[in-house]
């Protein structure tokens, strides 16, 4: 049997990936350029007996998916810039209460209402530090529909494994661009299901006591274990606590469970890096132009390579450092004012070799744009 | 079962001040649930942030203590995901009607089967006595040192207008009817709202010279009257209490089930 092949938008590829991963609860509020995700799911979820709800705003949507997730359902919301800002307080709640869920942010021009229909990658840092307080977060992205499908599944897998919200960071170009997607067979991409506790009814269950491997088995709301979930600092039962030892332990746990597994969470794609003396680093739709330029220049004998990041947070520092080790120049290609560039500068051995090739005017960055910067960097003039 | 079996001893002592109305409400809420005989495993209690919202921690249900104003949004997710569960959402007046006002009117409009209990002490207790949307004109608060210039919402009218299919009001003085009303609200299929006029002796009472808890309770007795009663007719300024709305209307989760059927047929 031949596999199902579709020709569709990135937003639709994301929906396909989410359904493949087992999504059965979605709450959202319309906003360009993410709206198609909600529209498609309003059609698809009821067909499989899943739940779709359009809430009164993005705050409510984020809260609703947390509530649904606690009953044992894989849950997601999708939004864009202004809506993503509204969700921040509740994203922090999901971090603190360790509730698995997936939040899609399809980036558009910002700040504020910005350029609703234009492309940008200006939310990278907001996914990292959008909610208040010290914390760690997982942010994933992709540059084509096949990868987007797989990374969407990975977003669900990581959220279940680490009991944490995962941000799926797309951009307007990826979201609206149409290309081919081959739907993998069932089982082709492994799925991580919720880890349920084996503690029997009547025995004390500790919802916030990590196992030796760091994972926290869950019990569904409505099940046999009644426990408390709160955004306050809490002990292993979920009861609020102001004990400094408990506060310290919880803060360390929340950060370490993510920062301590960077390797497992790192998804990057390497193109022609082996002998590259100019390394481009990019992600999302910008990586398409970067790859185009690399292949174009390779044909002329120039040694360009590309490191494409699919994991943005926790920042894949090791992978970046290694790729840049022998590079004369590192050019970070992104559609913002250098949000990933700064991170790259922090981890390479000589930050003066790192340059930014960007566009911030709502126009998709082209291979020529990158080439022009590269020529300036190399002292060749434009 | 005794009241104690619904309490989480580990959580005690509670943080409420002596004389606070929130304890009276918790007590009667437990009694209502007990007399309805609902299993503890079938109840999810969702709260926001405030003195009132701490109630969820003290009770032995599935409890979700969320964000200021957002309890109904979280509760909507729980309910739609697991419609067979009973969802009870106690909220403070600021929690429900100020920051959570939008969620409140939309939960009512959806007529989703959730019981909202507004523990109305006319003040922001937790943050130390600022005015709330239910404080009323002329009251004093830490952020209204010269007197509050807002009129209060009429929660009953707000809930009715927004589409709640069960709307009632009672007070912490009228404990018998409070229990009965809560029972009816929980059993009602649809969005049910119970406003309970309560007392915060620590902030509202002290600032507005309303005396101690006993005097505040007496005031709740004297300033209210049953719907359509003789006392109300004689003194129109009295606040009515009782059940204002009790209607059988399409409930959101039941309607959603019909959507599922439609989608699966097509
Ligand atoms: C987003 C947000 N804004 C403000 C606060 C601070 N805050 C906590 S409780 C509260 C008001 C509580 O008043 P009410 O809801 O009437 O409950 P009460 O304490 O009176 O029972 C406020 C403003 C907060 N926790 N979160
Ligand atoms: S401050 Fe007011 S509302 Fe809060 S516990 Fe004390 S009396 Fe109750
Ligand atoms: Mg209050």
Image (spheres, helix red, strand yellow):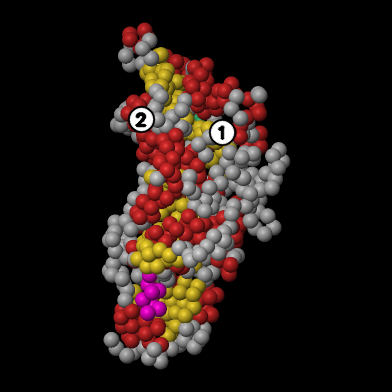
Is A269 covered by the magenta stretch?
no
Q: Quadrant of residue A332?
A: bottom left
Q: Secondary structure at mark 2?
A: loop
Q: Quadrant of residue B13?
A: top right
- The residue tagged 2 is B163
- Examine the rendering and report whether any part of residue A226 can be seen: yes
Residue lying at the far front of the rendered structure: A1
Task: Give how far across and how far down residue A10 sits, in percent.
Answer: 38, 63
Does mark 2 have its CB less than 8 Å from ligand 1?
no
Location of residue A200 by image quarter: top right
* Mark 1 Cβ and ligand 1 under 8 Å apart: no
Counting from the top left corner in percent of width and height, residue B112 is at 43, 34
User: Which residue ends up furthest to the bottom in the rendered image?
Assistant: A301
Is residue B52 visible in the rendered image? The answer is no
| Relative to A146, residue B147 above or below | above
- Rendered residue at 69%/39% (across/down): A201
**Predominant SS along the magenta part:** helix
Compare residues B7 and A335 and report the one nearer the observer. A335
Name the disc covering residue B43, or none.
1
Quadrant containing the C terminus of chain A is bottom left
Q: Nearer the viewer, residue A246 or B154?
A: B154
**Residue at image point 31% right, 62% down:** A109
The chain carrying label 2 is B
Task: Please determine whether, in this image, residue A196 is positioned above or below residue B138.
Answer: below
| Residue range of the region highlighted in magenta in the rendering | A284-292
Estimate the spatial distance between the alpha carbons at disc 1 and disc 2, rounded to whole Å: 24 Å
Of the residues under marks 1 and 2, which one precedes in the sequence?
1
């Amino acid at each position: 049997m031949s596999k199902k092949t579709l020709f569709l938008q990135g937003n639709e590829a994301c929906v396909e990936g989410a359904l493949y991963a087992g999504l059965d609860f979605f709450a959202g509020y319309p906003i360009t350029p993410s709206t198609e995700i909600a529209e498609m799911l309003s059609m698809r979820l009821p067909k499989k007996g899943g739940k779709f709800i359009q809430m009164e705003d993005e705050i409510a949507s984020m809260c609703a998916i947390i509530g649904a997730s606690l009953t044992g359902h894989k849950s997601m919301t999708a939004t864009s810039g202004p809506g993503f800002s509204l969700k921040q307080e509740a994203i922090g709640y999901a971090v603190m209460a360790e509730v698995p869920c997936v939040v899609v942010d399809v980036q558009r021009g910002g700040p504020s209402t910005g350029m609703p229909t234009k492309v940008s990658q200006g939310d990278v840092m907001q996914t990292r530090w959008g909610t208040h307080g010290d914390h760690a977060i997982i942010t994933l992205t992709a540059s084509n529909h096949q990868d987007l499908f797989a990374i969407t599944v990975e977003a669900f897998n990581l959220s279940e494994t680490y009991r944490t919200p995962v941000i799926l960071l797309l951009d307007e170009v990826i979201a609206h661009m149409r290309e081919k997607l081959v739907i993998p067979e069932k089982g082709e991409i492994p799925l991580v299901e919720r880890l349920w506790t084996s503690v029997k009814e009547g025995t004390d269950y500790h919802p916030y006591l990590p196992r030796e491997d760091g994972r926290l088995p869950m019990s569904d709301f409505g099940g046999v274990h009644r426990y408390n979930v709160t955004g306050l600092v809490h002990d292993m039962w979920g009861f609020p606590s102001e004990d400094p030892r408990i506060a310290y332990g919880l803060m360390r746990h929340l950060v370490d469970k993510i920062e301590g597994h960077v390797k497992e969470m790192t998804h990057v794609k390497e193109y022609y890096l082996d002998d590259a003396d100019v390394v481009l680093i990019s992600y999302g739709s910008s990586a398409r132009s970067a790859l185009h330029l690399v292949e174009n220049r390779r044909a002329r004998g120039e040694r360009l390579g590309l490191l494409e990041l699919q994991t943005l947070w926790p920042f894949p520092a090791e992978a970046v450092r290694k790729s840049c080790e022998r590079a004369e120049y590192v050019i970070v290609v992104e559609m913002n004012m250098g949000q990933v560039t700064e991170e790259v500068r922090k981890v390479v051995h000589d930050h003066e070799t790192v340059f930014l090739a960007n566009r911030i005017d709502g126009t998709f960055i082209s291979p020529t744009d990158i080439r022009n910067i590269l020529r300036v960097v190399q002292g060749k003039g434009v | 079962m005794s009241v104690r079996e619904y309490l989480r001893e580990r959580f005690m002592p509670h943080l409420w001040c002596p004389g606070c109305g929130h304890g009276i409400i918790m007590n009667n809420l437990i009694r209502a649930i007990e007399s309805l005989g609902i299993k503890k495993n079938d109840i999810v209690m969702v709260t926001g942030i405030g003195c009132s919202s701490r109630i969820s921690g003290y009770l032995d249900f599935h409890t979700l203590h969320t964000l200021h104003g957002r309890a109904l949004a979280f509760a909507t997710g729980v309910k739609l995901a697991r419609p067979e569960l009973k969802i009870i959402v106690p909220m403070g007046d600021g929690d429900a009607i100020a920051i959570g006002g939008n969620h409140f009117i939309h939960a009512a409009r959806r007529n989703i089967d959730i019981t909202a209990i507004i523990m109305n002490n006319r003040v922001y207790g937790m943050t130390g006595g600022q005015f709330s949307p239910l404080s009323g004109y002329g009251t004093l608060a830490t952020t209204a040192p010269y007197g509050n210039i807002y009129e209060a919402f009429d929660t009953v009218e707000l809930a009715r207008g927004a589409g709640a299919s069960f709307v009632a009001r009672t007070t912490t003085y009228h404990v018998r009817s409070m229990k009965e009303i809560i029972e009816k609200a929980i059993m009602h299929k649809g969005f049910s709202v119970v406003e309970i006029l309560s007392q915060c002796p620590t902030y509202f009472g002290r600032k507005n010279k309303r005396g101690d808890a006993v005097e505040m309770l007496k005031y709740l007795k004297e300033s209210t009257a049953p719907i359509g009663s003789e006392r109300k007719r004689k003194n129109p300024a009295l606040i009515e209490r009782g059940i204002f709305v009790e209607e059988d209307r399409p409930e959101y989760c039941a309607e959603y089930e019909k959507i599922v059927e439609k989608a699966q047929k097509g």
